[in-house]
Image (cartoon, helix red, strand yellow):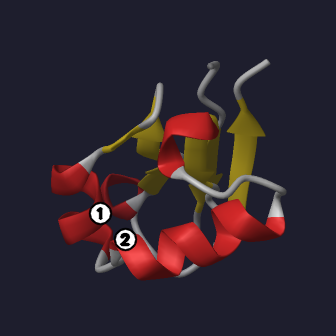
């Protein structure tokens, strides 16, 4: 999957304080990405809630799960 980036800046901050945000891959090809989940402080149960809302019953049915820069979680299911 492609990665989108966004840049946040504040008029009062110097240029070296610019932060770049990136989407985070939480699961891929039916497997959780544990390191990213820990970093983002998300549990398997929280992600599975979103996966079930997308119509899957098991993580094995997932192509990928992404935490978007705006905080939403996107799910793509296997074909």
Q: Are marks 1 and 2 in contact (CB under 8 Å)?
A: yes
The residue lying at 45 percent from left, 32 percent from top is 28
Return the residue at label 2.
44
The residue lying at 66 percent from left, 33 percent from top is 4
Q: Secondary structure at mark 2?
A: helix
Q: Tell me which corner region of the image, top left, top right, bottom left or bottom right, holds residue 54.
A: bottom right
Q: Is residue 38 left or right of residue 21?
A: left
Q: Is residue 6 left or right of residue 40?
A: right
Task: Say the numbered circle drawn on residue 37.
Answer: 1
Neighbor class of circle 1 (other Cα within 10 Å; few <14, some 14-19, many 20+) is some
Residue 5's x, y, as percent?
61, 39
Q: Which dot, 1 or 2, sits closer to the camera?
A: 2
- Seen in the picture, residue 24 relative to 30 is either above or below; the reply is below
Residue 27's x, y, as percent?
44, 43
Image quarter in which the N terminus is found: top right
The residue lying at 34 percent from left, 63 percent from top is 17
Image quarter in which the C terminus is found: top right
Does any portion of residue 72 appear in the rendered image? no
Which label's residue is closer to the chain start, 1 or 2? 1
Q: Residue furthest front?
A: 57
The residues bearing labels 1 and 2 have C-alpha atoms spaced at a distance of 8 Å
Q: Secondary structure at mark 1?
A: helix
């Amino acid at each position: 999957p492609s990665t989108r980036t966004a840049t946040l800046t504040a008029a009062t901050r110097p240029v070296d304080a610019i932060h770049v945000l990136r989407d985070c891959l939480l699961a891929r090809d039916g497997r959780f990405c544990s390191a990213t989940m820990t970093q983002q402080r998300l549990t398997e149960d929280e992600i599975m809630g979103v996966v079930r809302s997308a119509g899957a019953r098991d993580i094995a049915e997932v192509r990928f799960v992404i935490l978007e820069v705006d905080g939403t979680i996107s799910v793509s299911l296997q074909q």
